[in-house]
Image: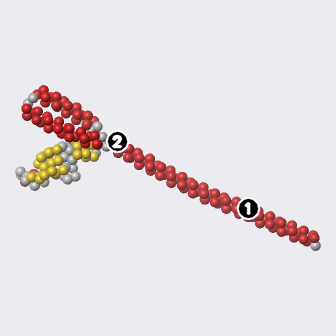
Amino acid sequence: MSNDKEELEKEIKETIEEKQVEQEEQEEVKEEATSEVLLEQEKDKFLRLFAEFENYKKRTSRERIELFKTANQELMTAILPVLDDLNRGIIEVKKVKEKGLLKGMELIQNKLTTILTQKGLQQLEVKSGDVFDAEIHEAITQIPAPSKKLIGKIIDITEVGYKLGEKIIRYPKVVVGK
């Protein structure tokens, strides 16, 4: 009997060891599967973060370019009334016919407009008789048209318009015929 008992104990030990080995193998497979899933999740997080960072770089680059294009806008808008006053002053000096004063003011005007043009400021070309366009012009008043051809067209320009790059920073103020 002791032989049978020993054999039975031996078989039980072997069965227990086999079960332990199987369980360990299953745990290793689970760990590998779990680590592969975790690795895939981390790769996905990394790719999403990388894509988000690329989008951020592109967006800030676009914003920086736009900022450089219109960085002078505030300064230009502040200088425009001075340019207008200078132009009005030149008109008045022409009436007085003071040649030396007129030449000096024209030199100042040319220098100022040259500098502003170099910085991207452009005067909007508007003439009497042009068709009024609400997207480009600002109508300050309507008056009866002197002729039928001038109905809905610009009769007078009271203030010149300017654009900086492609953006209009001051719309020309016009009088429209009705």
Instruction: State the quadrant of the N terminus.
Output: bottom right
Amino acid carrying mark 2 in the image: Phe
Q: Label 2: which residue?
A: 68
Q: Residue at x 77, y 66 (%)?
A: 19
Q: Residue at x 83, y 66 (%)?
A: 13
Q: CA distance from mark 2 to mark 1?
A: 65 Å
Note whether 54 is above or below 33 in the view shown.
above
- Which numbered tag is attached to residue 127? none
Note whether 29 is above or below 164 in the view shown.
below
Closer to the camera in the image, 3 or 101: 101
Residue 21: quarter of image: bottom right
Element assignment for label 2: helix
Q: Residue furthest top?
A: 100
Element assignment for label 1: helix
177 left or right, relative to 107: left
User: x, y percentage for residue 155?
Assistant: 11, 48
Q: Residue at x 13, y 49 (%)?
A: 175
Note whether 109 is above or below 17 in the view shown.
above
Disc 2: CA contacts within 10 A as few (<14), some (14-19) or many (>=20): few
Amino acid carrying mark 1 in the image: Glu
60 left or right, relative to 154: right
Specify the color scheme.
secondary structure
20 left or right, relative to 150: right
User: x, y percentage for residue 123?
Assistant: 21, 41
Of the numbered discs 2 and 1, the one sitting upstream in the chain is: 1
Residue 15: quarter of image: bottom right
Q: Label 1: which residue?
A: 24
> Can residue 59 be spotted in the picture?
yes
> Can residue 151 be spotted in the picture?
no
Instruction: State the quadrant of the C terminus.
Output: bottom left
User: x, y percentage for residue 147?
Assistant: 6, 52
User: x, y percentage for residue 86?
Assistant: 17, 36
